[in-house]
Image (cartoon, grey):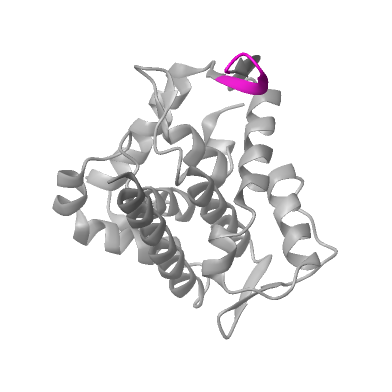
Amino acid sequence: MPHGSLSLPARLYLLSWDTTRLSVTGASQLPHLVRAGALTELVQRGLLTDEEGVVRVTDPDVRTGDTVLDGLLELIAESRPRKWKSWVTSRTRVTLDAVREQLVAEGYLGVGRKRVLGVFPSVDYRLERVPVVNALRADARAALTGPEPVDEVGDRDAAVVALAVAAEVRTFSSSKERRAHKVRVDALTARSGAVAPALGKVIREMQAALAVTVTSVAVTSS
């Protein structure tokens, strides 16, 4: 499958892989990043909407055909009303696990079994398509650094940058780069919400939620 057809949560997950060390970075906030990506794509597709800050499914009978996105749609439809920030942090492993299963099925990831401390069973994922992930990262970094005008960047590509920067994904950009390109990131954030008037506000809320998770992880680790 060409990487251009990957969903937004799948792209964000793959961007978190260090293709030199062949390991995932930022594991603590990764579930929140992937969930924010899924929420954003569903809004861009017109399947979620904002009602006074509360997430609503626009049509419970509509499906995308993507197992990750459809699983989240069903979860939201069957749950009590929540605000965007809550959905970025609530039951996020459900979406992360679904993304991994999807990427295993499509050949992006391999999977093995191991035991932690020789007792507890655990799944060990490995990256199978390093060149594809490197190409995906190059495309996303081109959207971040230019020279393509912001209004010519696709809304999904713009959302990748907006969310990856908010989550401070180290394999995507450094803190120095994030500062240097702040104006362009702000423009890409607006671009990612261009398909619907309320979407820009939604994405900014998700960026704020991701920033909180990054700060929380940093405080816990210190």
Q: Quadrant of residue 73?
A: bottom right
Q: Is residue 8 magenta?
A: no
**Which quadrant of the figure contains the N terminus?**
top right
Q: Farthest residue in the right direction?
A: 61
Quarter of the figure with residue 191: bottom left
Query: Of all residues shown, which one is farthest toward the bottom?
Result: 52
Left or right: 176, with 106 as reference point:
left
The percent coordinates of residue 163 (x first, y second) are 41, 53
- Number of residue marks: 0
Q: Give the answer, above or below, for where 55 lies relative to 5.
A: below
- How far across and how far down the image is residue 200, in percent? 44, 71
Q: Residue 58 in the image: state x and y as whole percent.
A: 73, 72
Q: Main secondary structure of the magenta part?
A: strand
Query: Looking at the image, which residue is at 61% across and 42% down?
Result: 96
Looking at the image, which residue is at 22% across and 40% down? 174
Examine the rendered structure and indicate whether residue 213 appears above or below residue 43: above
Q: Residue at x 52, y 56 (%)?
A: 36
Q: Where's residue 62, x and y in %?
A: 81, 61
User: Which of the 4 quarters of the picture holds residue 137?
Assistant: top left
Please indicate, yes or no, whether residue 146 appears anywhere in the rendered image: no
Q: Which residues are magenta?
A: 117-125
Q: Can residue 86 be seen from the camera position used here?
A: yes
Does residue 16 appear to the left or right of 118 in the view shown? Answer: left
- Image point (64%, 23%), residue name: 122
The correct choice, above or below, for 81 with respect to 208 in the image is below
